[in-house]
Image: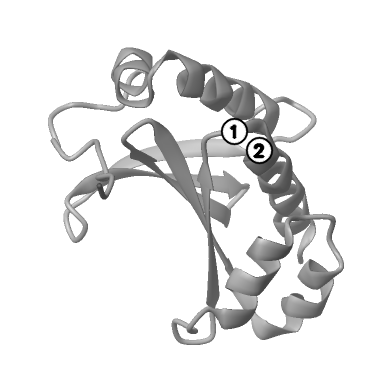
């Protein structure tokens, strides 16, 4: 059965309670650890929740100053992150210590204009390790 994207009501802000109910306790704890990591003073990223009418859902844009690092959406019992890279970054990403399946996904992705999407479904620690590696890589890009 296909999972569905959640947070579709424009009147219900994705508060901690809403996120906990959507993700379930285990994945909410995984999510909270991730949020604490990326928003810590050493990481310095900021999360900006907003309801987007075109997709009819709440999305979180994670930024470093004004630069978008990735997008985050909430699905039934997991969260999904979306990164966008340019072709010049593919070789560097291929050298990262991340799952081969992510490297294959990126190599086979269809470009959206000049950007190449990489989407990660996060519901376990292995996905979290790859996600943090990509967050730090994307943040380091000039």
> Residue 57, relative to residue 101: is it above or below?
above
| Residue 90 or residue 69, whichever sits in front | 90
Q: Is residue 85 left or right of residue 117?
A: right
Q: Where's residue 62, x and y in %?
A: 53, 45
Mark 2 or 1, closer to the camera = 1
Asked where in the image residue 116 lies, by quadrant, the reply is: bottom right
| Residue 88 or residue 105, whichever sits in front | 105
- Density class for disc 1 (Cα within 10 Å; few <14, some 14-19, many ≥20) is few
Q: Residue at x 57, y 81 (%)?
A: 108
Q: Where's residue 106, x and y in %?
A: 61, 73
Total numbered labels? 2
Give the number of the disc on residue 93: none
The C terminus - image quarter: bottom right
Label 2–label 1 contact, CB within 8 A: yes
Q: Is residue 28 left or right of residue 15?
A: right
Q: Residue at x 73, y 56 (%)?
A: 99
Q: Residue at x 38, y 16 (%)?
A: 16
Q: Considering the numbered disc 2 on the image, is that residue within a helix, a strand or a loop? A: helix
Q: Where's residue 29, x and y in %?
A: 53, 17
Asked where in the image residue 68 lies, by quadrant, the reply is: bottom right
> Residue 128, relative to residue 136: is it above or below?
above
Give the number of the disc on residue 128: 2
Disc 1 marks which residue?
A: 124
Q: Residue at x 66, y 38 (%)?
A: 128
Q: Is residue 85 something that shows in the picture? A: no
| Residue 41 or residue 127, whichever sits in front | 127
Q: Is residue 21 left or right of residue 85?
A: left
Alpha carbon separation for disc pair 2 and 1: 6 Å
Q: Considering the numbered disc 1 on the image, is that residue within a helix, a strand or a loop? A: loop
């Amino acid at each position: 059965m296909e999972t569905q994207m959640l947070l579709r009501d424009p009147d219900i802000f994705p508060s901690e309670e809403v996120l906990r109910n959507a993700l379930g306790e285990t994945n909410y704890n995984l999510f909270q650890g991730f949020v604490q990591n990326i928003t810590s003073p050493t990481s310095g990223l900021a999360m900006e929740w907003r309801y987007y009418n075109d997709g009819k859902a709440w999305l979180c844009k994670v930024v470093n100053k004004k630069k978008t690092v990735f997008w985050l959406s909430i699905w039934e019992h997991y969260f999904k992150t979306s990164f966008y890279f340019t072709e010049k970054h593919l070789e560097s990403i291929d050298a990262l210590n991340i799952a081969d399946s992510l490297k294959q996904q990126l190599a086979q992705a269809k470009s959206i204009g000049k950007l190449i999407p990489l989407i990660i479904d996060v519901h376990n620690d292995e996905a979290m390790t790859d996600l943090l590696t990509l967050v730090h890589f994307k943040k380091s890009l000039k």
